Image: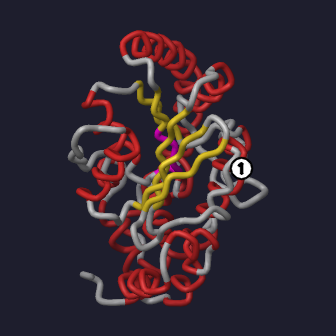
Amino acid sequence: MLEVVNTPFRHAQDALRFPRSERRWWSRIERSFALRPEPLLVYSAPKTASTSLADAVERLNTHTVIKVHHVQPEFFWPGVASTLVTGSGGMRHKAIHQRPTRAWLARFTGTVRTVSLVRDPIAFNVSNFTYFGRGFWMRTCWRSAPWMSPDDLFARFERTFPHGCLDVWWSREFAPTTGIDALAEPFDAERGWQVLRRGRFECLVLRTDVPDDEKGRALQEFLGWHQPVALDRLNPNAKQAPPVLRERLREAILARPGYVDRVLKLHSVAHFWTPAQRDAMRARWTGPNDA
């Protein structure tokens, strides 16, 4: 009850906060471009370690970094009384940088170097469900959610979350923005990354399970750095959601190999991972709880 009553106040606060934050965003970008005229767009679905990568590039002080998850209005969440899932099965998102980044892309005429990350689809679903649980998926039960049984938690997860939204992000968000159908372009799944080019977009597509030192080398090659850069782990799920939520949801998934098989049949999974890599992913989600 308290969460439901408090929700309109949070939305009213956002309505006041977002315009000011967007004005600050434009001011920051303009100052940054004066010093670093070459942009880098870190453009990934939510909860794919994009914050860690953007922070690593910003520390080098070589590019103006713009990090965003959605620029296609289909995925903008308007607020109260709107659905959380799009008609295509995508996941709507509430974020300050969506509208200004879309406006910036319309204005900017130069080459847009882009880094997009791909994450284990089951971990992706679990992380998005728990990280955004208070505002979205578990809004009416957030205070009691840490005490829900694994079965009850999975039932809510199964009923409310769009489990194929990773495919939708690539087909209805990334492709319309860049003009690149990443799921139809060749991808070196053994290596775990590939550079795709179309028009003014040069895109590094990079799997998050690639070791960090190899990620650094991929970024080094893509951006022309003199040496690889260390990637730190930022924005952990535990800061937003109780760790017990993920633990119980993982426990429930381990007991449901049918769910694992269903998610691993997504088009994006078959495209970005080899059969052997998919078998290893399945083993992680159907094996012992400490795997």
Q: Nearer the viewer, residue 107 or 154?
A: 107
Does residue 137 appear left or right of residue 167 in this picture? left
Residue at (48, 58) in percent of width and height:
194
Outermost residue, right side = 87
Residue 45 is a magenta residue: yes
Question: Which stretch is magenta?
Answer: 42-46
Residue depicted at x 54% and y 22%? 18
Tell me where residue 156 sits by quadrant.
bottom right
**186 or 277, which lies in front?**
186
Along the horizontal axis of the image, is 96 left or right of 75? Answer: left
- Against 201, is 272 above or below? below
Residue wearing tag 1: 83
- The image shows a total of numbered marks equal to 1
Say if 203 sits above or below 38 in the image. Answer: below
Q: Find out whether residue 116 is within the magenta segment.
A: no
Asked which quadrant contains residue 287, the reply is bottom left
